Amino acid sequence: MMKRHLWLAVALASVCQFTAIPTISSARAEEIKVGVLGLFSGSASWWGTEYRRGLNLWMEQNKGKVGDDTLVLLERDEGGVNPQRTRQLAQELVVRDQVQYLFGGSYTPNVLAMADVANQTKTPLVIGNSGTSSVTLKSPYFVRTGFTQWTVSVPLVQYAASKGIKNAAIVVADFATGYDAIDAYSDTFRKAGGTISTEVKVPLGTTDFSSYLQRVRDAKPQAVFMFMPVGPMSAGFVKAFKERELDRAGIQLFATTETMESDLPAIGDSALGTITALHYSPFLNTPENNAFVKAYKAKYGAGALPSIASVAAYDSMTLIAQMVRATKGKKDADKAIAAVKGYSWTSPRGPVSIDPKTREIVQNVYIRRVETIDGKLGNKPIETYKSVVEPWHQSHPQVAAK
């Protein structure tokens, strides 16, 4: 613990160039600053673009204000999976730029790197994306508006089991969230009476899936439960599954984020009929989502569609606004976090709330099927699992209580 305090002291001295450190909470500022950390460059810049769109749409609709307080967004580029850089950026935003709140995170290692900053400076971090369930245990100032892999995997498996699937293979990308997917899929499927025939881990960056799909074919499952990160790996795997005719071998593909609307043009008709489970679809037919999609298109173009990332950013601003109201614009992280525990609102994704015990979002999960909608491929919701409480925390109470 002494080492942790030592690195922050050194960082503070460096940022302030050995001058007196500003007292961040001493007076109410005219502007309330929100530090935004995202992937704004590189191969995963989709996340940063979508974050920016969701944030800016909320700011436009609310005129950048919460009551009499004006919000200012300070954007920083994580640049990729780079925990050291993300931690440095978070430090600078809090100490030098005096932000009261942090938002972002696109990869679990980057989010974990901000835990000490949040803890030692008492700065709330609203997590837009990190699929690893245990992340919120690392700081009492973490609250998640995205989703965990457990949250969407459990309903997906329950749905597959309800359709008579008894034997399945699991194929995941070989990193932390992939391991969560394996645990969620296997635990839920076995409880439903199913058997896992094989588990396959695919290295990040893989483009040739032939050997991995051959292992699946050899195992002769009825279905595959998959997890790949949004982007080229997701598109590549779904296309390869179809091209190698695993569907004709009687194997059904079940997924979560792998058929995002952003990836469907690259996947093409190979995606048709794929069943996924996710907490959002731009084709969700509710008054709130219809209004959100309309506003999104008006701002970003008729062909634009919101996503899990833009919705996470949009909802995060709603949550930060609640913190600002509760603290009357002052920096008070404990009061801010207390104000969002149990807080509920109606999001474009449906009714949501923050679990007061875990600081995880409680939300609907939609079973979706890829169809041609208005001439383009999209994910049509066909069934709803209502008010899903983050399952990992429920099934690991001893770990969560530590």
Image (cartoon, rainbow, N blue to C red):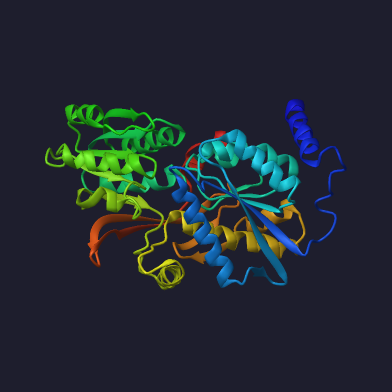
Q: Is residue 290 left or right of residue 9?
A: left
Locate the C terminus by quadrant.
top right
The mark total stands at 0
Name the residue rendered at 77%, 65% in the picture: 30
Name the residue rendered at 51%, 48% in the picture: 40
Viewer-closest of 370 and 83:
83
Q: Residue furthest right?
A: 20
Name the residue rendered at 73%, 63% in the picture: 31
Indicate the position of residue 25 as horizontal and vertical percent values: 81, 53
Indicate the position of residue 285 as horizontal and vertical percent values: 35, 69
Indicate the position of residue 13 as horizontal and vertical percent values: 81, 36
User: Is 290 rendered above or below residue 29?
Assistant: below
- Is residue 138 shown to the viewer in this render? no
Q: Residue furthest left?
A: 248
Displayed quadrant of residue 382: bottom left
Displayed quadrant of residue 251: top left
Name the residue rendered at 35%, 53% in the picture: 262
